[in-house]
Amino acid sequence: MASTDGQPLTQRDPEPDIEASERTPLISRSSNEQRDAETGEAQRERSAQSPPRSLSGGDEKPAKRRWPSLLALLLLCILAITIMVFAFIAPSVVEQYAQQAITFEPESLSIDSFTSSGVRARIQGDLVMDASRVDKKFVRDLGRFGTWIAREVESGRSFVEVSLPEYGNVLLGTAQVPPIKVGIQNGDITHVDFVSDLHPGDVDGIRRIAHDYLNGRLGQLRVLGEANVPLKSGLFSLGKQSIRQEMLFANEDVPKLPSYKIKKLNFREEALPSGRGMAADVALVVKNDYPVDFTIPPLGFAIKVAGCNKNDPYIMLADALTHDLYIHPKQDVELNVTGNVRRLPDTLTEACPGSHESPLDAILGKYLHGKDAKLYVQGSDSPSQDTPQWITDIISSITVPVALPGRTFGSLIKNFTLADTHFSLPDPFASPNTPASNPRISAKVQAIVALPEEMNFNISVSRVRADADVYYKGKKLGKLDLHQWQKASSDRIEPISESDGPTLMVESLVRNAPLNITDEDLFTDVLQAMLFGGRGVMLQVKAEVDVETETALGAFVIRKIPAEGQVPVQPITPGSGISDPNNPIITHLKPKIFNLAILDTAPHSLTLSALVNLTNPTKYTATVPYIDINILTNGTLLGHATVRNLEMGLGHNAFIPVTAVWEPYASNNGATGRELLSQYISGLNTTLTLQTSAASIPSLPSLGRALSKFNVTFPTPRLGSTPPSHDHPPHDPADPVEPGKDDQKPHFIKDATMHLITSTATFTLLSPLSHNTLFITSINATAFYHDEVVGTILYDLPFAVPPVDSHGEGIVTPRLPVDWNLGSVGFEAVKGALGGTLKLKAEADVGVKVGRWGEEVWFRGGEIGAKVRL
């Protein structure tokens, strides 16, 4: 083979060139590089000019492909960018995405068992990936891309610590979480079901948090959860991820204590090793809105109440025990608790300093008035040895306030009656508007008390006291002061039927309880109904009663028990009352005045005393220390009468002393007084009116004013010198003053005798006075026979009319000169009646005098039986 220049070539020819080229310095390669460049350009030209091998069918060697290298380079760039994104940018973005997109919907949290150091809990629920919950589009899109690549993540076994930064990072507890595999693509729902061991943290810290929570000082709470969780996705380990999550609970986010309702409360006696005690069985229904399922072991609690002051330690009241309690997801919990009260501490029943109430009074007072009473529940030793000690340690360090809902028991008093009622008016010397100035009531009170159905134990009442408001037709009439302890007795009455509850018959003797009238107009209505209505009235009593009881726990006082009852008050008069003119009150009082005496005289006034017999038609008795009553006739004041130290008993009351002052001139009513006396001695029908005033009861003017609206008008009673027989009281209801057929006769002139020869006349007079001598100072009289004048008497020499003697014969006047009307029909009739009796009429103006008092009255006598003698 020859070269192009004609020289032959062998296989060894190139070697010298190789060696030469190897020894040739690099700088001499310029010619070679030029030659190579020319050669390469020539080859490119040939390649461009010649067709491909596949088309030309030549057997040239194919060129090397370059596109796989380009693709690898592209993937490498993408991977680098991805690593940069996920290494520097994605962690925070994915964290935001995970926090917002992942939700856990719990189905059940059940406690598999309680261990000596904690709780083994089983947690069931669904982990849901929902990208729509992510707010920012960039975070949402990048998160969806990243989770689409990873598809699922599996965590290894880890420990979670929960602490509170605001409480010095106090450890609440720890939880051991087993491996969990979770789908993390958008829309994935992963059901998880695993068992975790939970362990309580710092007990003292938990106690501080619980106290702040229960006392309302926990406005917000930051909870920090920390864990180092090993993660992997498929075969790739993602290493341990440090997870730190904070949650803020504020206002409504802070869980509240579950609500509860007391279904049943029962108090009963119970035999205790130390004697008799009380037990309380409580059935509760507690609201449960949580998906938890576990069983609480038996627990013990101490029930306490607040002391007198806020800083005082709580007072032990009872021990309470619970049995196994089963909690089911979102189902109300029925809890039965039994509390035992062994004794009542002295600090519970003794009055607080500066007060009349004890801590027990405060609790019972709120409960009985329908207000919530606060108890304090603190854990104590468990009755079961299976209860872990750590539970006892935690609950014994926490005191939970529990509201005991109050109850309104309605009307505890089913029947309320007063027997042997006695009214007492106040002391006249008591100052007005003071307790001593109030009227007082004494009575035997009988009440049937309906016991609450919760009270299933023996109870007896030894003393009672109360402050009672008295109402009439819904309006407050006054206040009955029963603040003094009154002895009482009680007997339990068993129910007749199942629908009836137990009752207690309580009897108490109330003595001198003040009654303060606060509404005078309403009191007037009550009196009007009792006086004129002829029927009783129904008063309502609302009281707060203090009861001293004897129970298995000993004697203690239950204060301010609300009580309501109706008190029927009998009418003052039986029958239809004074509203019927044919049945006036005087019919029932039946007054009789006798033993009249004049104590003192003045020129225009008399002070008199008398004894009165009358009948009490009511079922009430009364004590009247002092009362002054005005005496009127036809609305004109003539004087007043005073009664002191009156003891009004039932039925007939005799020898009641009364003092009266006759002084019509003091009110410029002298003519009216003279007219009344004239009509009275003439035997005409006259009436007197008794009326109280504000001065009637000086210490209680309001009662006097109220009674003043009820004037008692009655016929002027006949005056007698001797008392009526007690063995034969008057029985004629038509003649209440003094029954008898001779009542219409003149009251002072018994008879008369005419002497014709001497032209004189004598009269037998009956003095109305029992102890004083009455003087007749002048007489100007005219006698009539059928309206014809018989004669006249003019006499101005005084003569005495002494009291009637024991035989009741009266006194015969001196012979009074008679000026006959000679020749008249009347004188002829007198002569015709010689030796017999003639009925005559008489008209006279008579001057009378007693002591310094004097008055001139007129007399009109009809049908006087005059004897005619020579």
Image (cartoon, grey):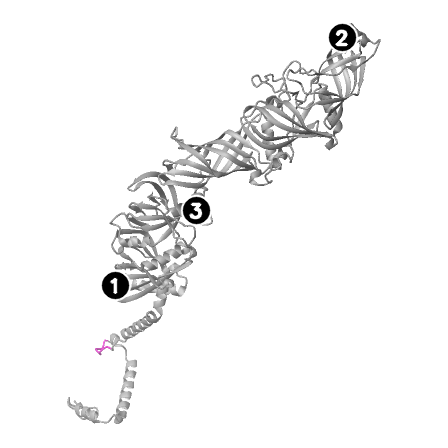
Circle 2: residue type: Arg
Of the residues shown, which amino acid type is indicated by label 1?
Answer: Gly
Looking at the rendered structure, the secondary structure element under dot 3 is: loop
Which quarter of the figure has residue 199? bottom left
Q: Position of residue 632 (x, y in %)?
A: 69, 28
**The one of 753 and 139 positioned closer to us in this rendering:** 753
Disc nearer the start of the sequence (3/1): 1
Residue identifier under label 1: 234
The disc labelled 3 sits on which kind of residue?
Ala
Q: Is residue 719 above or below residue 479?
A: above
Instruction: Tell me, for residue 869, which label it has, or none.
Output: 2
In the rendered structure, the answer to whether residue 62 lies left or right of residue 203 reads: left
Q: Is residue 65 above or below residue 769?
A: below
Query: Front-most of 157 and 370?
Result: 370
Q: Which residues lie in the magenta part?
A: 57-62
Give the CA separation, mark 3 to mark 1: 76 Å
| Residue for point 28% across, 46% down | 324
| Left or right of 325 on screen, residue 615 | right
| Percent of width and height locating residue 824 | 83, 9
- Image disc number at residue 82: none
- Disc 2 vs disc 3: Cβ atoms closer than 8 Å? no
For disc 1, the neighbor class at 10 Å (few under 14, some 14 to 19, many from 20) is: few
Q: Is residue 637 visible?
A: no
What SS does tag 1 mark? loop
Q: Nearer the viewer, mark 2 or mark 3?
A: 2
Where's the C terminus, which quadrant?
A: top right
Q: Magenta region, mostly helix, strand or loop?
A: loop
Residue 70 is situated, as x and y percent measured from the top left of the image, at 29, 74
Q: Is residue 605 magenta?
A: no
Q: Quadrant of the N terminus?
A: bottom left
Whole-percent x and y of residue 726?
57, 19
